[in-house]
Amino acid sequence: MDSLEVPYRTFDYLLTGFICNEANEVAIYRVEGQSANPGDAFGNVFAWLWEHDKDSAVAAFASLLAEARKQGDEGDQVRLEELIKGLRSALHRSRLGQEEEFWEVERALKEQVPEHFGGRTDL
């Protein structure tokens, strides 16, 4: 089965739980100063969201960053740049992982994710 209709509220709950779980993995396995890979599952979901609603994809990424930062050690929080770099690895099975396609994703994330954090630039 390729598609399944899910009510929006249920989809939102599923996505929120998924993001919290993936953020925990990011926080645990991240190596400071390197990429913070959100994993293939998140890459797959992000790619699907990007194709259907780019704003939702950006919001999911921002939620992943916020949750990973919350779950990380004090003073050693996941950085936006690290997570963007890791996302590229997570998108290796998608056309979005290709350099020319990823450039648009990276640009959108750098421009829009800070808005989800009140315009902060120290992410």
Image (tube, rainbow, N blue to C red):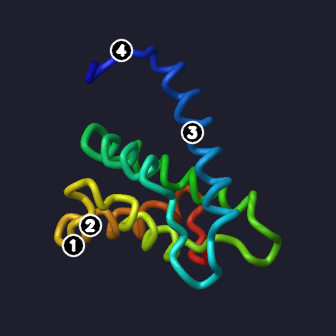
CA separation in Å, label 4 and label 3: 18 Å
CA separation in Å, label 4 and label 2: 29 Å
- Which residue is labeled 3 in the image? 18
Residue at the image position 74 percent from the left and 65 percent from the top: 72
The type of residue carrying mark 1 is Glu
The type of residue carrying mark 4 is Glu
**Local secondary structure at mark 1:** helix
**Local secondary structure at mark 3:** helix
Mark 2 Cα within 10 Å, few/some/many (few <14, many 20+)? Answer: some
Question: What is the quadrant of the C terminus in the image?
Answer: bottom right
Mark 1–mark 2 contact, CB under 8 Å? yes
- Which residue is labeled 2 in the image? 102
Mark 1–mark 3 contact, CB under 8 Å? no
Residue at the image position 51 percent from the left and 59 percent from the top: 38
Marks 4 and 2, the one that precedes in the sequence = 4
**Local secondary structure at mark 4:** loop
Coordinates of residue 23 in the picture (x, y in percent): 62, 53
Marks 3 and 2, the one that precedes in the sequence = 3
- Which residue is labeled 1 in the image? 99
Mark 4–mark 3 contact, CB under 8 Å? no
**Local secondary structure at mark 2:** helix
